[in-house]
Image (cartoon, grey):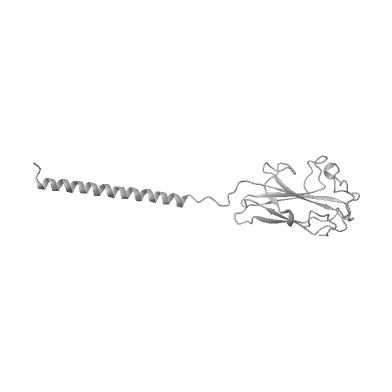
Amino acid sequence: MVSGDARRRRKTTWRRRFALAAALGIFLFALAAGALSACNLVDPLPDQRSLPTRAPSIEQDNVFPSPSQPVLQWPDQFLVPVRVYNPTVPFEWRVFIDYDSILGPNAPPIMHQSVAGSPTAADLQTQQVIIAPDGFQGACHRIDFVTALAFDSNRGANGTGADSVTWFYAPAGNFTGCSLYDGGGNDGAFPDAGVDASDARSP
């Protein structure tokens, strides 16, 4: 027969074991919670600006001079608003005059620039292009601005694609005699030579 003292000792032992188990459980829970909190502090949240790689695009309606009309006077500058979908990624642009993919596919650009990426950069970045008029005024010319994340050749963009804008310079006020520019070939075709550009806006 178990004495009263033995029963009391047994109850006390179970209480101690229960209290020890509870304390150990609380400790392990606190340890796990602390580890999870540490992971959250060490591992930064995903960058909200980390977007899929996509080629830049040109805001055609805001290009200056307007590419929808012939350019009558050589402008002091060309302004091209470029939309970048991940400002942290660098992009490039190139300018060609009288480029012809048939007779001169390897013709170098007359101007090129790389724009560095930055986490503080704007999504819309206006590129200023200044081309000295020497040698271009007085004759018809085609001017192409091409932008891409990167170029595999003088004009060919990498696999992400490219965007471009084209101006036609017609100082005579119409496209008579401008059916082919200096480069020649099919790509050199100007708009219909009979189109009258007299009502087009000067830049």
Residue at the farthest right position: 177
In the shown orientation, is residue 67 left or right of residue 12?
right
In the shown orientation, is residue 91 left or right of residue 7?
right
Can residue 147 be seen here? The reply is yes
Q: Residue at x 64, y 55 (%)?
A: 123
Can residue 128 be seen here? The reply is no
Task: Residue 78 in the image: state x and y as whole percent.
Answer: 77, 56
Task: Residue 130 in the image: state x and y as whole percent.
Answer: 77, 56
Task: Residue 164 in the image: state x and y as whole percent.
Answer: 74, 49
The N terminus is located in which quarter? top left
Q: Residue at x 10, y 47 (%)?
A: 4
The C terminus is located in which quarter? bottom right
Q: Residue at x 31, y 48 (%)?
A: 25
Task: Residue 55 in the image: state x and y as whole percent.
Answer: 67, 47
135, 137: nearer the viewer: 137
Number of numbered tags placed on the structure image: 0
In the shown orientation, is residue 9 left or right of residue 170?
left
